[in-house]
Image (cartoon, grey):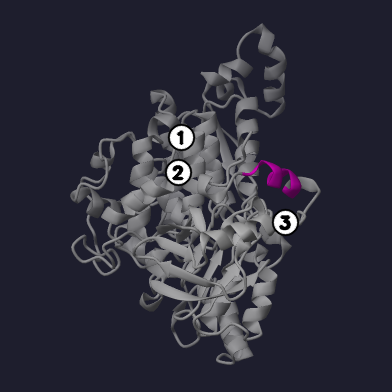
Amino acid sequence: MLSDNIKQGVERAPNRSLLYALGLTEEEMARPLIGVVSSYNEIVPGHMNLDKIAQAVKDGVRAAGGTPILFPAIAVCDGIAMGHIGMKYSLVTRDLIADSTEAMAIAHQFDGLVMIPNCDKNVPGLLMAAARVNVPTIFCSGGPMLAGRLKDGRRTCLSHMFEAVGAYHAGTLDEGGVEDYTENACPSCGSCSGMYTANSMNCLTEALGMALRGNGTIPAPYSARLRLAKKTGMQIMELVKRDLRPRDIMTAAAFRNAETVDMALGCSTNTMLHLPAIAHEAGVSIDLDESNRISAQTPNLCHLAPAGDTFMEDLERAGGVYAVMHELAEHGLLDTTLPTVTGKTIAENLADVENLNPEIIRPFDRPYSPNGGIAVLRGNLAPDGCVVKRSAVAPEMMVHEGPARVFDSEDEAIAAIYGRKIVPGDVVVIRYEGPKGGPGMREMLNPTSAICGMGLGESVALITDGRFSGATRGAAIGHVSPEAASGGNIALVQEGDRISIDIPNCKIELKITDAEMERRRAAWVCPPPKVTTGYLARYARLVSSADKGAILEI
């Protein structure tokens, strides 16, 4: 056992003495030591139940003959951090989580790991750590929140809540209406109830083969979630016995499967940051052009919020992620020979799976669209690519051209939107919000929700080198690369320039001549950094562009 490095022999007697100080018995030390990485805290609704999940995992580990040992991972609530300086600290936690988990796992020589994440950066951060540490590892997340219900009986969720603020500023919703959403949009613990980033990534743990069935979809308040946690704790002992490791599972083929499922589910655009970063840690390369090729052959089968009016609990009742995978596998779009943490291949996992609701999970021959939920656009405005959640764009905005309305920060754009200075046809450009320029690549849920809430979602586009919440809908195009702070062409856009967007053909163009572009480039001066001290300053110096997954480069 790997843990023998801290348990066996006279030379390790000092190490053993400290294990005795923990209250461990000889019998417990003789068993495999399993690190249980819990992201429990009391500020994130998606994590407030993880103490119970962790206890259930520990019970499962003990039942199967292991010794579970708990240690923590941090997590930020993107919704609470939204709209102020706190959002600069969201994406950057992904790497803090990966780094700190790597340090704890290797320093203490665990034989296996059970990761218990739930929210946006926490899931990819722990997947990155799993690939780095590469000891047998399995995931058990906290589960999605239940959908809310307004006083009139309509179902609702967090994306509706943000749009309600825009509707208030547009004069179409009063304070009482806003309060109705405030009290009812988030009715339980769990990751917010739509196909936002947290739930996207939790679903993709199943597609990658790193979690048991239901990990992405069983609602957080359900007792089935505790049973899943116990079974996960038991299963890690089987993985340790077999020495089945993350890099055996998270291969190039597994990432292609994950991207295929991503396109079918209509996941968050943030997956286009996280999957490349996780793959990088696993020694696999993902490029954005490959994502478009996968999208071109993968139909979009699900329209969960914000793209539609169904929620994670509906997907669970319809058969969950496995039912989506079954539809794809039946048509040859998945490699079903791959191993998974179940101890079986994907084909074996899917053998008895059914689609229980063809309105929630559309059949392959009746999709929402013939292409996947995400598109990567290229052109002179984004030579290295940018990303849009195609499945959440109104049909009339799939092709659009309009005048640029240019803002050098999210805050300036919000003021203009609420001040009714944005009109139908405009293309809002928000720059210097990328990984380096932000720093931290803030999510732009407030401006996109303001646009939709004010009734402009079918007539106004938004382009940024920042990123979007999974709760964003509309013609919201993010991850523009290179970013403005690196001298990308988005830095050269001027007020009133015409911008052309063609999502079906994956094109985005700034309608100026090459000579004019070069003239502007010669005159461009990079503004001073917004943050010069602390972790954000270090992050800005090390972080790559969004098209590489905003990884930290050594």
Distance, label 2 to label 3, CA atoms, is 57 Å
Residues drawn in magenta: 536-543
Are the two marked residues, 1 and 3, in contact with CB atoms closer than 8 angstroms?
A: no
Q: Given the image, on which type of amino acid does mark 2 rest?
A: Lys
Q: Given the image, on which type of amino acid does mark 3 rest?
A: Val
In the rendered image, is residue 340 in sight? no
What secondary structure prevails in the magenta region? Answer: helix
Circle 3 SS class: loop
Circle on res. 230 = 2
Q: In which quarter of the image is residue 287?
A: top left
In-image side of 66 versus 422 (left or right): left
Q: Which residue is disc 1 drawn over?
A: 63
Residue 538 on the magenta segment: yes
- For disc 1, the neighbor class at 10 Å (few under 14, some 14 to 19, many from 20) is some
Circle 1 SS class: helix
Circle 2 SS class: helix
Q: Which of marks 1 and 2 is nearer the N terminus?
A: 1
Q: Which of marks 2 and 3 is nearer the N terminus?
A: 2
Q: Which residue is disc 3 drawn over?
A: 525
Give the farthest residue toward the top.
Answer: 10
Is 115 placed above or below 316 here? above
Q: Given the image, on which type of amino acid does mark 1 rest?
A: Ala
- For disc 3, the neighbor class at 10 Å (few under 14, some 14 to 19, many from 20) is few
Q: In which quarter of the image is residue 517?
A: bottom right
The residue lying toward the viewer, choosing from 227 and 498, is 498
